[in-house]
Image: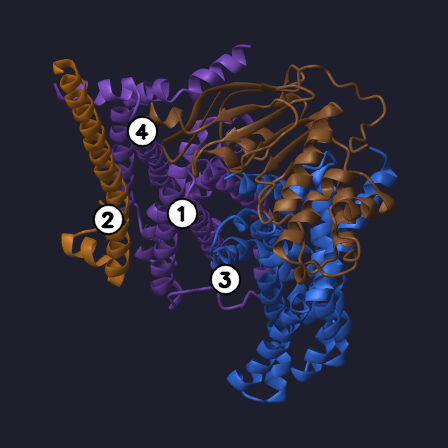
Amino acid sequence: MSDSGLAKLVVAVLRRDVMASLRRGSEWSNPLVFFVMVCALFPLGIGPQPDRLAELAPGILWVVALLASLLATDSLFRGDFDDATLEQMLLSHQPLYPQVLAKTLAHWLMTGLPLSILSPVLGVLLQLPAKGMLALMVSLLLGTTVLSFIGAIGAALTVGLRKGGLLLSLIVLPLYIPVLIFGSSAVKSAVEGGEYFPQLAMLGVFYLVALALSPLAICGALRISVDQ
Amino acid sequence: MSISSTFHKWGSPRWFYQFSGKLLPWLAGLSLLLLVGGVIWGLAFVPADYKQGNSFRIIYIHVPASAVAMGAYMTMAIAGAIHLIWRMKLAAMVMKAIAPIGASLTFLALLTGAVWGKPTWGTWWVWDARITSVLILFFLYLGIIALHQAFENRDAAAKACAVLAIVGAVNIPIIYWSVEWWYSLHQPASISFTGQSTIHPTMLRPLMATLSGMYLFFTWVLLLFVRVEILDRERNTRWVQDQICGESR
Amino acid sequence: MSVRRQAGVVLANTGLEVKRLYSDRDDRVLFADLCFQLDAGQLVQIAGPNGSGKTSLLRILAGLSSRYEGEVLWQGKSLLKQRHEYLQQLLYIGHGAGIKAVLSPLENLRWSCALRGLNNNDDKILSALEKVGLSGFEEQACHSLSAGQQRRVNLARLFCIPASLWVLDEPFTAIDQRGVTEIERWLSEFVSEGGAVLLTTHHRLSFAHEFKIVTLGEAANV
Amino acid sequence: MYFDTVGDFLSMGGHGPYVWFCYGVSALVLSILVGVARSRRKQAEQQIRAIVRRKKASSSSTTQH
């Protein structure tokens, strides 16, 4: 298997998933709408005082982004499982690892990326000081990728089950905790005027570990889910 | 060759059933002796802690429960890996049996931790690093149990749980370290209780007894559950039927 | 003309060999002691009533399912030991849709080909689509096609992906009478060129060559 | 014995309720674990006996005819 062959495989899978997701529309827009709506609920729930909102904003934004990413994850393999195109991936003589990697990255492009780009707008709504915006965006860019990879493990494990959605949250949420801790802490440090590079570096480490290891678990989980 | 034959033997449910049957009375006796003895020792004979008073005596059940719960998760992940790699059915049974036991012990650790907190710190729940980690461990157990129940097919359930347990086990050090870091960031000055400074050797000895007692208890109950699972799965085999109906006659 | 074997691949005489295969579902035996052989240039039809395990058997033979005991050999060697080589030769079409509804037939087949390492072969895809009677529909989203047409998009993979073994689960579903005759002709062309076909169908095959029928559902009565 | 009286031992300087509650619940949970294992074993044994009984019944009926 030549390197260019693998690259072509990755590009083909990536292109197909992004195209399908763009055509359907709801797949990438629903998590965004969810993100906006839930963020808008918080001032209604805890009161409109700007200083209080500003203090809570890093945590709120990160938790809601995490939930939005989680909700989107269930659909990662479900469509392919239902229309049996997942079987074609498993029965390709080419390795599954790059295919899974490409699928997860495509999913992040359609959910995590727009979420991160939109996040400063919601930061403004929640009175997040301008100092925290860059940290918010960068931490979300790195963090949501990790969330996508971890979530993909859960999605692959539950894709063969009829009621996978809620179960997926149960098994994946505890694994999200380190990302949440470092992501929100980065934003908080930035707001307080402190150093936030260490937290981002930590997220970067998680990113690399997830990129390298999680596809292994996803491949195994997919084979198990199809073999029922 | 010898490794694989040992594995083969260990993987045989029949051999395991008969071997574990001989261990059971020893495990039961020793674990209860150590647990009950250690608890009586810790409750009645060890002097009170000069800072916390008598509430520290909860340590003799709290620490063993959390330590064994943690170890049980790792054991579950190892059993899962063995099941996935060597397709050993016995490992799947061990994995399935550990989940409810581990979850019960984690629940116990959480509950005793909370009750300990009330007289010591004046509140039922403190988001301190250790108790938060135990809470997350509890979530991980619940996830495994929920995933196992969701599958109709036994083999798929075992394999899926094995993957999840391994992923969880890889994550646990990261999660614990993150929580530790998070706690050090937010630690309020008023709670400055640290375990090491107050633990006196005389307090430690009963703890060793209950800790090893809890490990043995875990092994004992685990064997009980695995044996039931073996009977369930192999109920159509001759040896199981002879075993059960032979005993009654 | 329909078999495009990769250069250098020489078909051995024995294709697929099933030895003492056993599988069950929830303590119900689907088949036990199942033995048959499928050589190059042969067609085997798996018959049997609903629930007799036809799809399960095909999924086992495609390597999607591991819920069996016994042996499956490909060219004399166990399937498990040469999965990669086997998958290169295998084309499995299950009873699922096999296509993404929001994508066009062309896009779907491009992706299917890319999974098999075939890039930039739009010519082949277009001629395959023409062969299954879908010229003019290449760029239309699949969800706007009829069920039979969607099935044909899936079957078009037969003509743009080289393989020496076709495993087809109910290929005639949703296909009209004329289409069925056509598919039978394709199968016989493929077989006469040295391909091997394993399929399930409730339809009475009218097939130019001799073919074997393996009937499931009898083992369960024992 | 660290405590002077049984009353002291039970009250534990005011911490008694907490300590005793912890040990009570622990004893309960641990014995439930053992109990569940025992009852599941009884169930499994009963099922296996039923299978054996059915097998015997069917084999004796076939030998008669």
Vertical arrangement, residue A188 with respect to residue A101, above or below: below
Type of amino acid under label 2: Leu
Q: Check disc 4 and report the residue beneath it.
A: B227
Q: Check disc 1 and report the residue beneath it.
A: B149
Chain for mark 1?
B
Q: Chain D is shown in which shade?
A: orange
Instruction: Kindly check if marks 3 and 1 are in contact, taking CB atoms under 8 A apart as contact.
Output: no
Give the mark toward the camera: 2 or 1: 1
- Numbered disc total: 4
Type of amino acid under label 4: Arg
For label 1, the SS is helix
For label 2, the SS is helix
For label 4, the SS is helix
Chain for mark 3?
B
Residue B189, label in figure: none
Residue B192, label in figure: 3
* Residue B142 image offset from top left, x and y in percent: 43, 51
Q: Are marks 1 and 4 on the same chain?
A: yes
Q: CA distance from mark 3 to mark 4?
A: 46 Å
Give the mark toward the camera: 3 or 1: 1
Whether residue C47 is visible:
yes
